[in-house]
Image: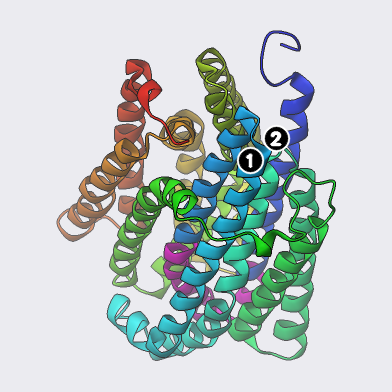
Amino acid sequence: MEKKHQFTGRDLRKLIIPLVMESLLNMTIGMADTIMVASCGEAAVSAVSLVDTVSLLFIQVFSAFATGGAVVISQYLGKGDKDMARKSAANLLYITFAISMLLSLFLLPLRRGMIGKVFGSITPEVRTYTDQYFVPVIISYPFLALFSCLTATSRSEGNSARTMAVAFLMNAINICGNAVLIYIFGMGPQGAGIASLASRIAGFFAMYFLMRKKTEELSTSGMLGTPFSSMLAKKILRIALPSGIEGATFQFGKIMVQSLIASLGTSAIAINAVTNNYNAYANIAGNGINLALITIIGQCRGNNNFRDISYYTRLLVLLNILSTFILSVPLYIATPSFIALYGLEAGSIETAIPICRLCLISCTLLWSFAFTLPNTLKAVGDVKFILFTSISSMWIFRVMLSFILIKFFGFGVDGVWYSMYADWIFRGTLYMIRYKSGRWKAKKVI
C-alpha cells in the first residue's frame, strides 16, 4: 500500500487514530454530563436529554457547514492548489460565524416556547431544568460552530493529532466544570450547561491559536483578512446546504420521536437518553473513521483518483465493522454494570439492558453501511442523493413506524429502536446500490 496508493499506511494511521481518540473524548463528555447530572435525579437526566436532542438539530447544521468546507478544502489540497484551499477555509469561517450568531440571537428569547411546543407533556420540574440548561448551551453555539470549522480544516490537511489534543482539553474543562458546579455549588443541569459553554470557548481559541503558525498549510494567521468570495461560498454551500437540510431533517425527526417518548413518561425519557449515550460507545471508532473518510476521499477526488476512492471506501467500511465488533463484545458483557452507573431506578435499568444489547449487535451489522458509506458519496459531491435517501428513510421508518409501534401495537421505548434499525437497513441498502452504480463519478465540486 505504501507505493500503490495515494495515502500510505502511516498516513492513514496518523489521520485515523487521533480521530478515534477524539471521538472517544467527545463521547466521554456526553457520558460525564449524563452521569454527573444523574445525581440530581431522573428529571435532571431527562431535561439534559431533551435539550441535547433539540441542540443536536443545530449542531447538525454546524457540522454540515464544516463538512462542506472540508470537502472543498480537501479537493483543492488533492489538486495541489493550496491557495484556494486556504481561501476556502477563510470563507467557511465567515459563513459559519454569521449563521451561528443569527441562530443564537434568534433562539435565546424563544427557547421556552420551543421546548413547550416540542415536549408539551413534560413535568414542571423537567421544564425548569431544560430552561436552565438550554441558555448556556445556546450561547455556546457560535464558539462550537467556529471550532467545528477549524477542526474540519485541520483534518483536511491531515493534522488530526491537534484536534485530538484540543478535544482532550475540552473534555477536562467540561468534567472539572461539572464537578465544581454540580457537586460543590449544586447548580444541577445549569452547571452542566455552563461547563459545556466554557469547554467550547476554550476549544475554539485553542484551535485558532494552534493553527496560527505560518508554516501551516492552512494557517489562521492573516486568514481573517482574506476577502469574501461568492464563488467559494457557493462551492461550500453546494455541499453544506443539502448536508445541513439532511442533518436538520434527520434530527427534527428524532425530536418528533423524542416527543413521542416523552408521552411515555420521565422514566422512558431517561432510559432512551442512557441507551443513546451508552451505545454511542460502540461507534467511537466508526465516528473517527467517518471523519477521516471525508479527507481521504476528498483528496482522492481532487486528484481524480477513482481507483483509490473505491479502495479506501472498501478498506474503511471493513475497518469500521471490525472495530465496532471489537468494542461491542466487552460492552455487551458489561451492560448491566455500566447502565447502573447512570442512576436509573431498578425497573428502568432492567428495561434498558436488552435495548442496549440489541443496539450493540445492530451497530456491528448495519451501522457502517448506513453512515460510513454515504461519507464517500458526500466527499465526491453526491449530496442530493444522500438528502433524498436520508429524508425518506427518516420519515417512513424512524417517525411513522415508531408512531405505529407505540400508539397501535403498545410498544414502549424499544419500539423506537426497532424502527431505527429498519431505517438503517433501508438507507444502507440504497447507499450500497448507489455506490455500486458508479453514478457518483460524474459529480464535481471544484
**Circle 1: residue type:** Gly
Q: Hey, which residue is sitting farthest top in the picture?
A: 4
Residue at 41% in and 50% down: 234
Residue at 45% in and 86% down: 108
Asked whether disc 1 touches disc 2, contact meaning CB atoms under 8 Å apart, the reply is yes
Residue 261 among magenta residues: no
388 and 418: which one is in front? 388
Which segment is the magenta one?
35-59
Residue 251 appears in the picture as rendered: yes
Which residue position holds label 2? 16
- In whole angstroms, how far apart are the C-alphas of marks 1 and 2? 6 Å
Residue 31 appears in the picture as rendered: no
Which residue position holds label 1? 288
Residue 48 among magenta residues: yes
- Which color scheme is applied? rainbow
Most frequent secondary structure within the magenta stretch: helix
Looking at the image, residue 114 sits to the left or right of residue 315; the answer is left
User: Where residue 345 appears, x then y in whole percent?
Assistant: 52, 69
User: Where residue 90 appears, x then y in whole percent?
Assistant: 61, 57
315 up-or-down from 124: above or below: above
